[in-house]
Image: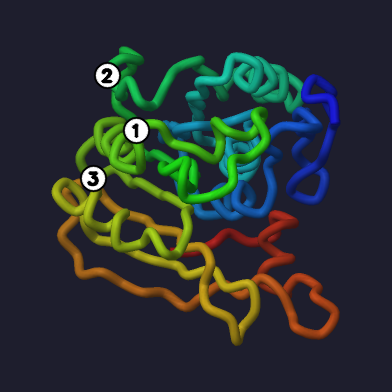
Amino acid sequence: MDDTQVTEDRMLNGRVRLRQRAGGYRAGMDAALLAAACDAGPGERVIEAGCGVGGALLSAAARRPDSRFHGVERDPQAAELARGNAALNDMANRVEITTGDIEAGFRALDLPVFDAAISNPPFFDDPGALRAPAPAKTGAWMADGGLAAWSGFLLKAVREGGTITIIHRADRLADILALLAPKAGSFRIRPVQPFADAPAKRVIVRAIKTGKAPLVLLPALVLHERDGGQHSAAAEAILRGETDLGW
């Protein structure tokens, strides 16, 4: 497949138009869930670390029309597509994109801190742990500096009392908590299960910088019904933008 070919897809039941490379990393369920988990209030500023072409960022912006959003993406082609997608959806006045590397840290961006940060960090940081992905997808799947670099970026990116929301592999939950815990707390964790009788494969973690409240493990979101494999009613409502992923 030609990595330069661009397709136009829809998210939030058609409310968000998204142009993305046919052969590259493509926004899907994780982006939709991350957007639904963003609970920024009116006037608040949100940063997404590793925004890609803007799937989660623009979906969150569509859900939160009174908030402002800023995406950071190191792939220049993806960042340019994200800028185009912001304009395509008439959001360029409140969605900005910076081409930058998360590994360099938040301070390298020379931006004021944000009220909230969201991210779907690359799922792997050991190239020997899995078969290498297609070259066009490597940046989205492999974190050169590991999860520690992404956690450090997010902690620096938000003000005290600001929120950090991450979607990631369920088996990295302990690492996420350990990396955020020195400076964040009030954790709320939402497991995401493919089926009601299957273990969670994803977790969505929300933390508050300097938060002190006890950790809360929330009811799981079940994505599919066993009969026919269709989305559950809860998942379908989230994908259509009819409801948020409440905390």
Q: Is residue 187 left or right of residue 1?
A: left
Using residue 84 as the reference point, say whether residue 33 is left or right of it: left
Regarding residue 119, the answer to whether it shows in the image is no
Sequence-first disc among 1 and 2: 2
> Looking at the image, which is closer to me, 190 or 58?
190
Determine whether the residue tagged by mark 2 lies in a helix, strand or loop.
Answer: helix
Kindly state the secondary structure of the residue where label 3 is placed: strand
Residue 228 numbered mark, or none? none
* Residue holding disc 1: 145
Q: Residues within 10 Å of mark 1 (few under 14, many from 20)?
A: few
* Pointer 3 or 2: first along the chain: 2
Q: CA distance from mark 3 to mark 1?
A: 26 Å
**Where does label 2 land, which residue?**
107
Disc 1 from disc 2: Cα separation: 16 Å
Q: What residue does disc 3 label?
A: 161
**Residue 128 position in % (x across, y down):** 46, 45
Q: Which x, y percent locates residue 127?
A: 47, 40
**In this rendering, is residue 108 above or below 41?**
above
> Mark 3 and mark 2: span between their CA atoms?
19 Å
Which corner quadrant holds the N terminus?
top right
Residue type at mark 1 is Gly
Decide: few, some or many residues near mark 3? Use Cα within 10 Å; few <14, some 14-19, many ≥20.
some
Query: What percent of the width, then of the height, locates residue 96?
Result: 54, 19
Q: Are marks 1 and 2 in contact (CB under 8 Å)?
A: no
Q: Quadrant of residue 109?
A: top left
| Closer mark to the observer between disc 3 and disc 1 | 1
